[in-house]
Amino acid sequence: MIPVPSTTGDPARLQVCLLGAFRLLKVGAPVSLKPGGKGEQLIGQLALGLRDGVSRDALLGTLWPDIDGSLAGQSLNTLVHTLKRLLDDALDGHPPVVLTAGRYALNVAAGIRVDVAEFDAAARFGDHRSRVGDLEGAVDAYRRATALYQGDLAFGSDVGALLERERLRSRFLGILAHLADAAFSSGDYQRALDRGLEVLAHDPCREDAHRMVMRCLVRLGSRSQALRQYRTCRNILQLEFDAIPEPATDALYEQVRTAPMLV
């Protein structure tokens, strides 16, 4: 069963944000942590490993790579206790970090939320509503997902984090493209244009977004601008990849040029 994302708008008891910038919010108010410090690193690692938790050895190797194992273990215990004193008032006294079977995890059962997980949940719910034919419900869920995406993943520099950053970014751009298609299908060409341009602001090489912008401009009465958009697309692909547009983009250009009433 697909969980329905929260729509109450109430702030989380404790919210960990990794999209755009690292932020820790206690009932909506920012919590002061040393930027790049051990507390931020621990919470960030646990937020990225939200589903399965993170092993003690992995945390020690990341947070204290050059310290003897026993001393590093003591430091981890101290850090977990420090975070409990700082944050448990927002969780009715429950610890923010729990240890189960040798793996540390954020205490989501006590009310901790992570923006990456909420983004994924909203996106999955949108996919589900789309599959069952509830297009309005899908659009609502996708809009919630885009609102949660405040920027690319801003935590982690290892291979896993890099892959996760690209996964989330690709997911976000795909959702924007879906919203553009939905708006175009409903005749809201200005909204579709705005979504297409938003995609291009993040990835200027996406030809599907260039085509969307071209179609919207024609429908909005700006045929000449649509033709210029094609040239912009062609120039970007040449500069970035020494490539030419896809056949679908060339075909749309010819249609805009010779038969705009069919676009």
Image (tube, rainbow, N blue to C red):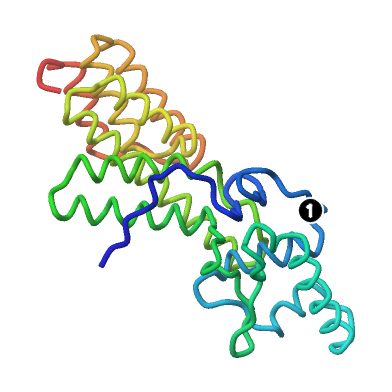
**Residue at 32% across, 39% down:** 177
**Left of 143 or right of it: where is 74?**
right
User: In which quarter of the view is residue 179 placed?
Assistant: top left
Picture coordinates of residue 175, whole percent (x, y): 35, 45
Viewer-proximal residue, 229 or 35? 35
**Left of 163 or right of it: where is 128?**
left
Q: Residues within 10 Å of mark 1 (few under 14, many from 20)?
A: few
| Image quadrant containing the N terminus | bottom left
Please, which residue is most extreme toward the left here? 262
| Image quadrant containing the C terminus | top left
- The answer to whether residue 234 is above or below residue 29 is above
Picture coordinates of residue 237, whole percent (x, y): 43, 36
Q: Label 1: which residue?
A: 33
**Residue at 31% across, 38% down:** 208
User: In which quarter of the view is residue 224 placed?
Assistant: top left
Viewer-proximal residue, 41 or 176? 41
Viewer-proximal residue, 2 or 64? 2
Picture coordinates of residue 60, whole percent (x, y): 77, 79
**Residue at 63% across, 77% down:** 98
- The answer to whether residue 180 is above or below residue 95 is above
Picture coordinates of residue 67, whole percent (x, y): 89, 81
**Left of 150 or right of it: where is 82?**
right
Give the tally of numbered discs: 1
Q: Amino acid at mark 1?
A: Leu
Element type where label 1 sits in the image: loop
**Left of 255 or right of it: where is 177?**
right
